[in-house]
């Protein structure tokens, strides 16, 4: 079995000393007090199986978070399940809800795990294009309405804020998605791990807050992106009790439970948001992280423009996609994958082709074959070094 493009690019970065802007994990950890709670839990003996649904303190913190930010009322006992990261929540949801041969609808490009997880569940992957525009990537709503009407489509797997494009679906776009789900009786599984990492005044709106959607939506998020603890792998799914029960019935045969000492730390992280930042500076961590990411995005997009690429300005997440067609043509390369393999030698930077997030042969795959994804979640010093190197591509 061949390694993934992510493993290949990371190995290339290591071998060449290139700046790795391919894989999206932060250089810096989250709040110190959150780490201390985890360390104290380990030393205090919180190292055995936690409750199957997650510890009560974490479930209460998740419910309070949803109520505070979105006005969503959740039953702590029946409507929340703590998982081993968001990816396990998505896997368990698809395995629970997708019958063999049933259609699962996603936007394309899509987080690379989606295709594999849909296949694991025996589903048919149906995609709708995200189209590059002067206003960033926007969903083709006509194609979405048509795809949702296809016989056999059962689940709509939605990701906003969106990896890899950085798009944040607007209220009108979300209403169109909700209308399609309601019209065709689709269940919605929504991946919202970047929910707080949005920029330029753009706000994330959970689709579960739209009329008629709460009773058919499973909402998934995690601590990894919001608080920069990607290695802890603590996520959660919330929604109607019968749907959460279905996910639990699968999850218990995947990891059963996990993250015992991390769960109280994640509860503390979510509770930090309720404090006054003037009394506890860590209470402002998430807002400060989003503001810092916006600045780092601007640093990277400026460097990409100097390198001869055209970045599509993201409204959220860790990532920016750049159209490198002109650069690829000037270098005589075949596509973005060839460019990414050449970048370490050309300028000492590593990135990932957008083809890693598309279905081979699809309309989107053809349209984005010259597009490259870069991450800006690295330290400012790392990005400044990349910004010095990228303009070498003009030489």
Image (cartoon, rainbow, N blue to C red):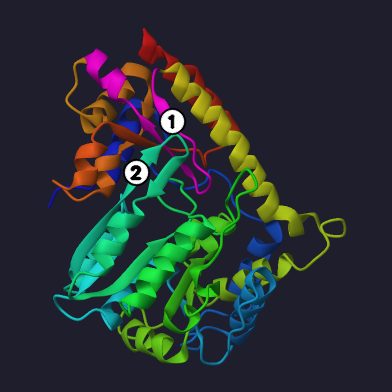
Residue at the spot x=39%, y=18% of the render?
308
Q: Residue 232: which disc? A: none
Within 10 Å of disc 1 (Cα), the crowding (few <14, some 14-19, many 20+) is many
Residue at the spot x=21%, y=43% of the render?
365
Residue at the spot x=33%, y=39% of the render?
10
Magenta includes 126?
A: no
Q: CA distance from mark 2 to mark 1?
A: 14 Å
Residue toward you, 36 or 204 = 204
Q: Which residues are magenta?
A: 308-331
Asked which secondary structure carries label 1, the reply is strand
Above or below — where is 332 with respect to 354?
Answer: above
On the image, numbered disc 1 is attached to which residue? 311
| Residue 290 spot, x, y in % from top left | 63, 48
Above or below — where is 291 with respect to 306?
Answer: below
In the rendered structure, which disc, 2 or 1, sits on the residue that comes first in sequence? 2
| Residue 1 spot, x, y in % from top left | 12, 52
Within 10 Å of disc 2 (Cα), the crowding (few <14, some 14-19, many 20+) is some
Magenta includes 326?
A: yes
């Amino acid at each position: 079995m061949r390694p993934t493009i992510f493993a290949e690019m990371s190995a290339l970065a290591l071998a060449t000393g290139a700046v790795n802007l391919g894989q999206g994990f932060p250089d810096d950890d989250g709040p110190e007090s959150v780490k201390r709670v985890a360390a104290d839990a380990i030393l205090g003996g919180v190292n055995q199986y936690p409750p199957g649904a997650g510890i009560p303190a974490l479930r209460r913190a998740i419910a309070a978070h949803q109520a505070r930010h979105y006005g969503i009322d959740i039953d702590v006992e029946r409507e929340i399940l703590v998982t081993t990261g968001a990816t396990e929540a998505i896997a368990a949801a698809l395995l629970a809800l997708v019958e063999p041969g049933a259609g699962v609808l996603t936007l394309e490009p899509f987080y690379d795990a989606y295709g594999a997880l849909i296949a694991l569940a025996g589903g048919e992957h149906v995609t709708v294009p995200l189209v590059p525009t002067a206003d960033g990537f926007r969903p083709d709503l006509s194609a979405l309405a048509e795809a949702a009407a296809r016989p056999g489509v059962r689940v709509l797997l939605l990701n906003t804020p969106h990896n890899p494009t950085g798009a944040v679906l607007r209220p009108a776009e979300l209403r169109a998605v909700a209308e399609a789900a309601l019209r065709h009786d689709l269940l919605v599984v929504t991946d919202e791990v970047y929910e707080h990492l949005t920029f330029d005044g753009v706000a994330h709106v959970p689709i579960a807050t739209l009329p008629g959607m709460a009773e058919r939506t499973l909402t998934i998020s995690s601590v990894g992106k919001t608080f920069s603890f990607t290695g802890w792998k603590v996520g959660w799914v919330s929604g109607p009790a019968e749907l959460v029960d279905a996910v639990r019935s699968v999850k218990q045969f995947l990891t059963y439970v996990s993250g015992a000492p991390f769960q109280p730390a994640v509860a503390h992280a979510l509770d930090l948001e309720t404090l006054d930042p003037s009394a506890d500076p860590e209470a402002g961590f998430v807002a400060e992280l989003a503001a810092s990411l916006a600045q780092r995005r601007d640093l990277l997009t400026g460097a990409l423009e100097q390198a001869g690429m055209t970045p599509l300005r993201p409204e959220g997440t860790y990532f920016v996609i750049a159209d490198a067609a002109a650069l690829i043509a000037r270098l005589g390369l075949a596509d973005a994958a060839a460019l990414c393999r050449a970048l370490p030698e050309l300028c000492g930077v590593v990135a990932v082709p957008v083809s890693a997030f598309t279905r081979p042969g699809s309309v989107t795959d053809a349209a984005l074959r010259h597009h490259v994804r870069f991450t800006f979640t690295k330290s400012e010093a790392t990005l400044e070094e990349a910004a010095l190197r990228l303009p070498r591509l003009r030489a």
